[in-house]
């Protein structure tokens, strides 16, 4: 998928892979997330260079997961921005963690960090947590474009990981809604409007009710918001993580 929202915003993704977004601002091009593979990120960089014909001002990582950060190697030497927590979590990658992933040539951690948020007149980057402790959003105010990272999955089951917090995640979605974006770029899936946010919030609320025993699994899977999402095996894995959190 290569989707140009206009001549200032372009999103690059593939079936289920993490999206990479390029936005032209007055200061230069901002790139959000870099994918799992440095070689892919280099190809996307060439594409964005050709599309914008402007220098890259900065690169943003929404959270520490490798499918959003390992492509940083293609942008070595540029200003890479994230929350302080994202940088710390990336620096904590050990051999056991890396052994489960494709070989990586070099891990490039962010060179500029913020604590809770970074903001100027055109851009807001804010750590909200939820999907992971460090999950951040990127909001381009003039374009009304919101990059959610993995706080939103559109058309795919959410990846609920051991450090996910469902309550924090739902509150993060409510915060995003208050920003009134026109376009939302999910961590995975097609660019959409607010409808993907609403579907994600409904999804998480129903998962909570399932865990609380208010719904059974059959009822949940009869809902098209679940049954029509791709990667159903991810849903099973997510439930295992949630049960582990609860000591079940």
Image: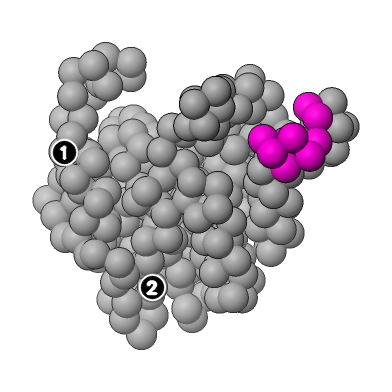
What's the mark number on residue 91?
Answer: 1
What residue do we see at 69% from left, 49% from top? 205
Q: Is residue 28 visible?
A: no
In-image side of 165 versus 73 (left or right): right
| Mark nearer the viewer, 1 or 2 | 1
Name the N-terminal-most of marks 1 and 2. Answer: 1
What residue do we see at 46% from left, 69% from top? 139
What residue do we see at 69% from left, 39% from top? 212
Q: Is 150 in front, or is 35?
A: 150
Label 1 packing within 10 angstroms: few (<14), some (14-19), many (20+): some
What residue do we see at 43% from left, 32% from top? 162
CA–CA distance between discs 1 and 2?
24 Å
Residue at numbered disc 2: 124
Q: Is residue 193 above or below residue 235?
A: below
In-image side of 154 versus 30 (left or right): right
Count numbered badges in the picture.
Answer: 2
Q: Is residue 82 above or below residue 220?
A: below
Q: Secondary structure at mark 2?
A: strand
Query: Quick one: quadrant of the N terminus?
Result: top right
Q: Position of residue 134 (x, y in %)?
A: 34, 51
Answer with the quarter of the image where residue 71 lies: top left
Find out whether residue 30 is within the magenta segment.
no
Q: In the image, which residues are magenta?
A: 209-217
Q: Position of residue 11 (x, y in %)?
A: 51, 52
């Amino acid at each position: 998928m290569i989707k140009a929202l206009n001549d200032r915003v372009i999103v690059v993704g593939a079936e289920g892979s993490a999206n990479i977004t390029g936005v032209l601002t007055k200061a230069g091009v901002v790139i959000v997330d870099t994918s799992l593979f440095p070689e892919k990120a280099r190809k996307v960089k060439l594409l964005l260079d050709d599309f914008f014909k402007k220098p890259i001002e900065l690169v943003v990582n929404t959270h520490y997961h490798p499918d959003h950060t390992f492509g940083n190697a293609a942008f070595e030497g540029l200003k890479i921005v994230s929350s302080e927590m994202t940088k710390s979590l990336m620096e904590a990658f050990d051999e056991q963690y890396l052994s489960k992933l494709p070989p990586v040539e070099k891990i490039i951690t962010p060179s500029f960090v913020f604590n809770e948020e970074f903001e100027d007149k055109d851009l807001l980057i804010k750590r909200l947590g939820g999907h992971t402790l460090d999950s951040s959003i990127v909001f381009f105010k003039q374009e009304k474009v919101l990059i959610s990272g993995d706080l939103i999955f559109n058309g795919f089951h959410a990846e609920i990981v051991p450090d996910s917090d469902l309550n924090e995640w739902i509150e993060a979605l409510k915060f995003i809604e208050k920003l009134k974006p026109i376009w939302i770029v999910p961590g995975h899936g097609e660019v959409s409007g607010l409808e993907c946010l609403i579907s994600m919030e409904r999804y998480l609320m129903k998962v909570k009710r399932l865990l609380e025993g208010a719904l059974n699994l059959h009822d949940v899977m009869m809902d098209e918001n679940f049954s029509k999402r791709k990667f159903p095996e991810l849903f099973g894995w997510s439930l295992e993580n949630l049960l582990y959190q609860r000591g079940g």
